[in-house]
Image: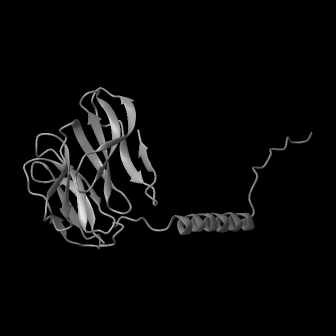
């Protein structure tokens, strides 16, 4: 009588493991080389990161040197909320939105927090948020809600703060400006990408 043979599990030869490990290292190495380092500095290259933080009972704009142990500097000192900081292309100015006037408006200040200027008040809009600089620094794209219709839209305003023009309306959202976000200009300034 013969014993039933039990199938043996398949085993990979040591050389197969070496080959697989080498292939994975090459793949991940190529992915890292193509992706490059994360770009957290402004296009102007001053090396600082701008952000908003809730540290004094409200949101304020801060800048930080990204080096280990780098200094943080608070730029806005107002009882209202200041958020959505965006560097100008040359790194000399920061655009941000604030509710310091009672509405969410867009402001600009120098990189050191001086020369605070209201770019556009939300007089004809429920809110203006999320400023994004054009590549040449002459315009800002904004997310705005129109008081008349409650529709979200992307608005363009020149940095001198004249009037905004509606670029794209994104449908009724009941007055909420959160339907459109993450504005980003194309390098040639001809298009704006956004998420909705």
Looking at this view, name the residue that lies furthest to the right. Answer: 1
Q: Is residue 30 left or right of 101 when viewed as pictured?
A: right
Of 129 and 5, the residue lying toward us:
129
In the figure, is residue 27 to the left or right of 102?
Answer: right
* Residue at left offset 35%, top offset 35%: 179
Q: Which of 27 and 16 is in front in this view?
A: 27
Q: Quadrant of the N terminus?
A: top right
Report the residue that reaches farthest toward the front: 162
- Vertical arrangement, residue 55 with respect to residue 39, above or below: above
Residue in the image at 15% along x and 40% along y: 103
Q: Where is residue 144 in the image (x, y as percent from the top left)?
A: 28, 39
Which residue does the image show at 25% across and 27% down from the upper left? Answer: 148
Instruction: Please say which color scheme the image uses.
Output: one colour
In which quarter of the view is residue 196 placed?
Answer: top left
Quarter of the image where one finds residue 146:
top left
Q: Quadrant of residue 151?
A: top left
- Given residues 105 and 56, the one toward you in this image is 105
Q: Is 46 positioned to the left or the right of 135 in the image?
A: left
Task: Pinpoint residue 14: horizontal percent, then vertical percent.
Answer: 72, 66
- Number of numbered markers: 0
Coordinates of residue 188 in the picture (x, y in percent): 46, 60
């Amino acid at each position: 009588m013969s014993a039933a043979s039990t199938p043996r599990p398949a085993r990979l030869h040591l050389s197969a493991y070496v080959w697989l490990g080498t292939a994975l290292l090459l793949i991940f190495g190529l992915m890292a080389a193509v992706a490059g380092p994360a770009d957290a500095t402004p296009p102007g290259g001053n090396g600082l990161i701008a952000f908003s933080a809730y540290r004094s009972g409200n949101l304020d704009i801060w800048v930080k040197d990204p080096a280990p142990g780098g200094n943080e500097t608070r730029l806005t000192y107002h009882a209202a909320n200041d958020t959505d900081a965006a560097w100008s292309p040359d790194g000399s100015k920061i655009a941000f939105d604030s509710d310091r006037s009672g509405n969410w408006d867009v402001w600009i200040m120098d990189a050191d927090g001086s020369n605070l200027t209201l770019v556009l008040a939300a007089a004809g809009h429920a809110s203006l948020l999320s400023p994004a600089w054009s590549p040449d620094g002459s315009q800002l794209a904004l997310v705005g809600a129109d008081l008349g219709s409650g529709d979200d839209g992307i608005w363009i305003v020149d940095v001198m703060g004249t009037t905004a023009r509606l670029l794209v309306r994104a449908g009724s959202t009941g007055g909420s400006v959160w339907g459109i976000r993450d504005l980003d200009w194309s390098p040639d300034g001809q298009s704006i990408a956004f998420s909705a």
